[in-house]
Image (spheres, rainbow, N blue to C red):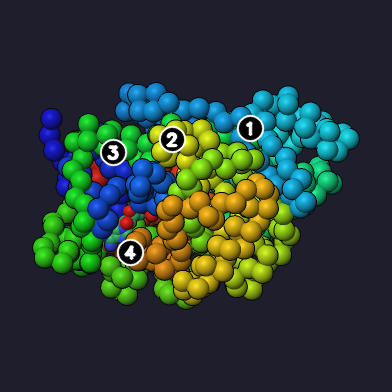
């Protein structure tokens, strides 16, 4: 076995982990440098007082994308964890405690829609058939394109299908063509929150997310979401990847148009090539000189960012009634919160929020008889987030949570930790403390995303949620593979 090149990966999130294994499989010597003391990036975990909290993602959608990655390395999901389909997948709570639970079985979901609005079952079937078409083309094909040439999207089959793909119509208009009941509209529009833009600015192409979350279903890896980065680390170690934790890259050292070293506080590491999976903005604006950046500060400032979040990790010393695993509090106006997120960029007046209670499914994440509760409120990036503000919103969320569950929760909180914009900045070097990267607006889709290749440095590629294909766990895993494939091609070409 010959070792070819020494490749440095900056960051150990999903994209960095995926890129590392793909490169090491081709016998390159791959070193992952991570600033934190744990791999996983935004999907780290921590334990306190017998509770285990996933710090970031909790919705396991598109299991086929993750399975396909494991298959590349002769593994399957069950080699690493038990994956269960949640039923109900999630619950949406509207005004006056009116709640709708989304069943896992397709026919039950159609019936639920019909019960809410006459004729909605047929409309849902039609909507989903279009969404499935988009999923098959989008997730199995388009998202694996590097976004470097316009020819990738000018292929005859895609041009012919462009209207079927609904690239140019808005998600908001698309949903309203099918459904009228405001509850159904909200249920269909909610996945767009994951994409981080107002439904009116998001291409209807992204109804593929409805297919993922409502037809394929919502899954959960027993043991917690961190099981995925742990599985990816095992694969990487099998391929010979070396991990260097507590290694904060301070500079990418250049010789003309090539990167030669990574500089840390007390040493330099030589490299033949680099894949940067830390936030793109940080890599360019902090680790590279101005002369070698793809984009300037003005460019970043003009991008539409997906929201940041205010999070609370709570250990509750009793069981909380009336909660499912995933609970969306849509008991206030979605449009108003979206407006405050994207237009006014202010702390919301009447926020929507999400409550995850994984201990409803998994007894390993909380001590017996107790509950692991995670609150998430989407928030515009770049805002000031002092302790007093965090507490104000904690009380707003708890008032509504306690009223809905008819349960006194605050008096039973034995562990509490908040996490917000400034933590995203200090822990991940996240631009404006963003949580989920760039929003998937029409002008920030596919070829219009920040480029995966540095066009002034021959051996530097970018990966992760700020480049193609976009935010979310499955896209980040795909992004790592796409960046690694591009680097492999350029190494082959230079031989
Ligand atoms: C609260 C929250 C909830 C989410 N919920 C979901 C969900 O339910 N489902 C879903 O699919 N997605 C969800 N997401 C999005 C998903 O988690 C991300 O899109 C994905 O994890 C991003 O992976 P990444 O590899 O691009 O970046 P990251 O995970 O950020 O990895 C980048 C790594 O680079 C490291 N780094 C930064 N600077 C340096 C440096 N100078 N030197 C060395 N290392 C450095 C960072 O420490 C980090 O470990 C959520 C995200 C958050 C924050």
Distance between the Cα atoms at labels 3 and 2? 30 Å
Say the numbered circle drawn on residue 119.
none
Asked if residue 173 lies left or right of residue 213, the reply is: right
For mark 2, does the 10 Å Cα neighbourhood hold few (<14), some (14 to 19), or many (20 or more) residues? few
Q: Which residue is labeled 4 in the image?
A: 283
Q: Secondary structure at mark 2?
A: loop
Q: Are marks 4 and 1 in contact (CB under 8 Å)?
A: no
Q: Earlier in the sequence, mark 4 or mark 3?
A: 3
Label 1: element kind: loop
Q: Is residue 469 left or right of residue 354?
A: left
- How far, Cα to Cα, is label 4 from label 2? 44 Å
Of circles 3 and 1, which is in front? 1
- CB within 8 Å, label 3 to label 2: no
Q: Which mark is residue 233?
A: 3
Residue 368 numbered mark, or none: 2
Q: Is residue 283 visible?
A: yes
């Amino acid at each position: 076995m010959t070792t070819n090149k020494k490749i440095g990966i900056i960051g150990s999130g999903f994209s960095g982990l995926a890129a590392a294994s793909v490169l090491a499989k081709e016998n390159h010597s791959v070193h992952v440098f991570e600033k934190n003391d744990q791999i996983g990036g935004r999907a780290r975990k921590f334990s306190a007082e017998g509770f285990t909290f996933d710090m970031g993602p909790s919705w396991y959608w598109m299991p086929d994308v993750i399975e396909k990655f494991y298959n590349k390395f002769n593994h399957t999901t069950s080699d690493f964890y038990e994956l269960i389909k949640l039923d109900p997948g999630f619950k949406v709570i509207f005004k006056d405690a009116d709640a709708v639970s989304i069943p896992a079985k397709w026919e039950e979901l159609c019936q639920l829609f019909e019960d809410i609005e006459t004729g909605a079952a047929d409309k849902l079937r039609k909507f989903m058939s279009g969404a499935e078409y988009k999923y098959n083309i989008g997730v199995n094909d388009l998202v694996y394109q590097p976004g470097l040439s316009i020819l990738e999207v000018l292929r005859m089959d895609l041009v012919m299908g462009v209207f079927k793909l609904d690239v140019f119509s808005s998600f908001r208009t698309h949903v309203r063509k099918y459904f009228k009941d405001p509850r159904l509209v909200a249920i269909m529009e909610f996945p767009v929150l994951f994409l981080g833009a107002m439904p009116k600015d998001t291409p209807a192409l992204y109804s593929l997310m409805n297919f993922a979350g409502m037809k394929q279903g919502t899954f959960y890896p027993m043991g917690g979401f961190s099981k995925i980065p742990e599985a990816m680390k095992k694969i990487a170690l099998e391929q010979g990847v070396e991990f260097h934790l507590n290694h904060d890259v301070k500079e990418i050292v250049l010789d003309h148009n090539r990167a030669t070293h990574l500089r840390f506080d007390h040493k330099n590491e030589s490299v033949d090539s680099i894949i940067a999976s830390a936030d793109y903005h940080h890599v360019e604006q902090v680790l590279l000189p101005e002369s070698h950046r793809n984009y300037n500060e003005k460019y970043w400032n003009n991008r539409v960012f997906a929201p940041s979040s205010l999070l609370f990790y709570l250990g509750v010393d009793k069981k909380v009634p009336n909660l499912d695993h995933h609970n969306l509090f849509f008991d206030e106006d979605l449009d108003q919160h979206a407006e405050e997120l994207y237009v006014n960029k202010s702390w919301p007046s009447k926020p929507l929020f999400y409550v995850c209670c994984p201990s409803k499914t998994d007894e390993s994440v909380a001590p017996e008889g107790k509950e692991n509760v995670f609150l998430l409120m989407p928030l515009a990036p770049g805002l000031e987030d002092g302790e007093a503000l965090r507490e104000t919103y904690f009380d707003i969320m708890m008032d509504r949570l306690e009223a809905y569950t008819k349960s006194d929760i605050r008096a039973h909180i034995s562990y509490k930790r908040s996490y917000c914009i400034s933590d995203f900045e200090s822990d991940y070097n996240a631009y404006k403390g963003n949580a989920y990267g760039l929003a998937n607006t029409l002008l920030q889709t596919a070829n219009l995303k920040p480029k995966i290749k540095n066009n002034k440095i021959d051996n530097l590629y970018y990966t992760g949620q700020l480049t193609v294909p976009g935010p979310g766990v499955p896209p980040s895993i795909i992004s790592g593979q796409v960046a690694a494939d591009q680097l492999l091609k350029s190494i082959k070409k230079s031989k």
